[in-house]
Image (cartoon, grey):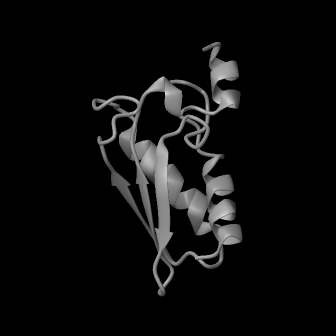
């Protein structure tokens, strides 16, 4: 996968907003990796802000919908991981400003 395609995918996932925090999953630092195989199957490795997140299914569905709009993407698998654990240092400067975190 070339860098431009990866950037397009990350940009598409910026439209997925964490409903509890009101900031997108990319700027929150929840997306750890994006890979695509030769058949166009994308695997997104990401985490959530908490293990008991009641909206995990909704976020996964939104990720799949966001990537489905990219022509090269034929299928998407979202792999939720807990290691490394998410922390506020993973957030972008934009997310920290939006949430009032220093």
- Write down the quadrant of residue 3 in the picture: bottom right
Horizontally, is 29 left or right of 3 in the view? Answer: left
From the top left corner, tell me how far across and down residue 43 is, in percent: 42, 66
Which residue is depicted at the point 34% across and 32% down?
Answer: 54
Which residue is depicted at the point 53% across and 39% down?
Answer: 29
Q: Can see residue 59?
A: yes
- Which quarter of the image is occupied by the C terminus? top right
Horizontally, is 82 left or right of 38 in the view? Answer: left
- Write down the quadrant of residue 28 in the picture: top right
From the top left corner, tell me how far across and down residue 78 is, in percent: 39, 58
- Which quarter of the image is occupied by the N terminus? bottom right
Q: Is residue 62 above or below residue 83?
A: below
Residue at the bottom extreme? 38
Horizontally, is 46 left or right of 27 in the view? Answer: left
From the top left corner, tell me how far across and down residue 32 is, in percent: 46, 50
Query: 83 or 45: which is nearer to us?
Result: 83
Q: Is residue 43 above or below residue 74?
A: above
Which residue is depicted at the point 65% across and 46% down?
Answer: 15
Q: Is residue 45 above or below residue 22?
A: below
Horizontally, is 96 left or right of 55 in the view? Answer: right
Q: Can see residue 19?
A: no
The number of discs equals 0
From the top left corner, tell me how far across and down residue 83 is, in percent: 30, 42
- Write down the quadrant of residue 76 in the picture: bottom left
Q: Is residue 91 above or below residue 65?
A: above
């Amino acid at each position: 996968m070339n860098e431009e395609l990866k950037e397009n995918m990350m940009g598409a996932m910026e439209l997925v907003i964490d409903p509890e925090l009101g900031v997108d999953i990319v700027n929150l630092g929840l997306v750890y990796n994006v890979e695509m195989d030769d058949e166009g199957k994308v695997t997104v490795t990401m985490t959530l802000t908490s293990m008991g997140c009641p909206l995990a299914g909704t976020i996964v569905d939104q990720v799949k919908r966001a990537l489905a709009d990219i022509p090269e993407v034929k299928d998407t698998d979202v792999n939720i991981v807990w290691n490394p654990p998410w922390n506020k240092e993973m957030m972008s400067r934009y997310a920290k400003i939006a949430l009032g975190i220093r």
